[in-house]
Image: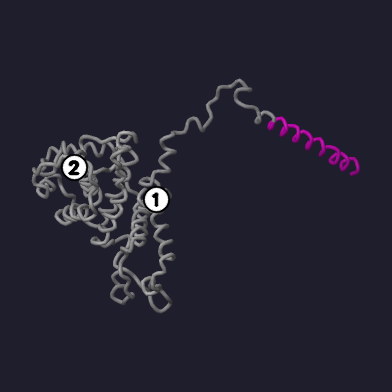
Amino acid sequence: MGNATSCCVSSSPKLRRNAHSRLESYRAEAELSRDDTGCNLQHISDRENIDDLNMEFNPSDHPRASTIFLSKSQTDVREKRKSLYINHHPPGQLRRKYSSCSTIFLDDSTVSQPNLKYTIKWWVLCFFGLNTHHVLNMDTDGRMLLDIFDENLHPLSKTEVPPDYDKHDPEQKQIYRFVRTLFSAAQLTAECAIVTLVYLERLLTYAEIDICPANWKRIVLGAILLASKVWDDQAVWNVDYCQILKDITVEDMNELERQFLELLQFNINVPSSVYAKYYFDLRSLAEANNLSFPLEPLSRDRAYKLE
């Protein structure tokens, strides 16, 4: 027994020393650089697709990335919030309704069933902020103005385009009338407006172009055309848009759709997480600009409808 015990005790330190020596040698080899070892093995990071890594930061593809329109409006929102405290508005104008245990306040819009009228108003506010064109910087910012979107080369009506058509930013009312006409005539849903916004930001990041007075109408038309076909079960045909915009040809609509798809790299997928992010970011932008819904107490009938 004594010999067996002494044998076990004497052998244990040897095993620990051997394992320790192997660990030290492994660490020493691991700390050597690839140049020192003389092996030209490709590291796994070298084989990763750079484009796939950059896609994580694309708001139209990644649910965690902040939307472009909300990022641009954050500075304005901070300034407005500061002005509320500086100007000392009356308390009645700053009151808000909050839900409690006995009363729940809701508006007339949900992520699954947005309100069309207010969603278009939010959309116009968002699109107005996306207009990043500056006439003086148009040739120096490296952005492109594609011919297919140029309203002078591809007019939407027979009315002559003014000579300075590319130097005056559109007003929000003008954008609203144009978008509202398309949605009303084509009977599009509010969900289609959110998908349209996703495609717009995807176009800005993929094609690296700016929205400016010369191209905003045709860019919006192309995004709405594509979103209506992808989202709605009863898609609107290109010839239907020719009946809404009576002076445009089917061939022009087909070419607009084709080039829009190519600029999106045929990526028309909109995950539910990305859709929800754009919806709630739209609501945040609307609330910051006092365009939110009037809140009403939740009634029994509305509760049944929500179910």
Pointers 2 and 1 in contact (C-beta within 8 Å) = no
Find residue 132 and name its label.
none
Q: In which quadrant of the rendered view does residue 10 lie?
A: top right
Please give the name of the residue rendered at 41% of the width and 35% of the height, measured from the top-left corner.
51
Please name the amino acid that badge 2 sits on.
Tyr
Q: Amino acid at mark 1?
A: Ser
| Residue 148, visible in the rendered structure | yes
Q: Position of residue 194 (x, y in %)?
A: 29, 53
**Residue 57 x, y percent position in the rendering:** 42, 43
| Image location (x, y in percent) of residue 160 | 10, 42
The residues colored magenta run 1-27
Compared across the picture, whether 17 is left or right of 224 comes to right
Is 3 or 283 nearer to us in this picture? 283
Q: Is residue 88 left or right of residue 172?
A: right
The residue pinned by badge 2 equals 165
Front residue (pair 130, 89): 89
Q: In the image, residue 294 lies at what x, y percent?
A: 30, 70
Q: Is residue 226 among what the camera can see?
A: no
Q: Which residue is mark 1?
A: 71
Vertical relation: 276 (above or below) 55: below
Find numbered disc 2 in the image and state the secondary structure of the residue it sits on: loop
Q: Residue at the far top: name it.
A: 38
Foreground mark, 2 or 1, reads 2
Characterize the magenta stretch by its predominant secondary structure.
helix
Task: Please identify the quarter of the rendering in which residue 88 is found.
Answer: bottom left
Instruction: Looking at the image, tell me whether mark 2 or mark 1 is earlier in sequence order.
Output: 1
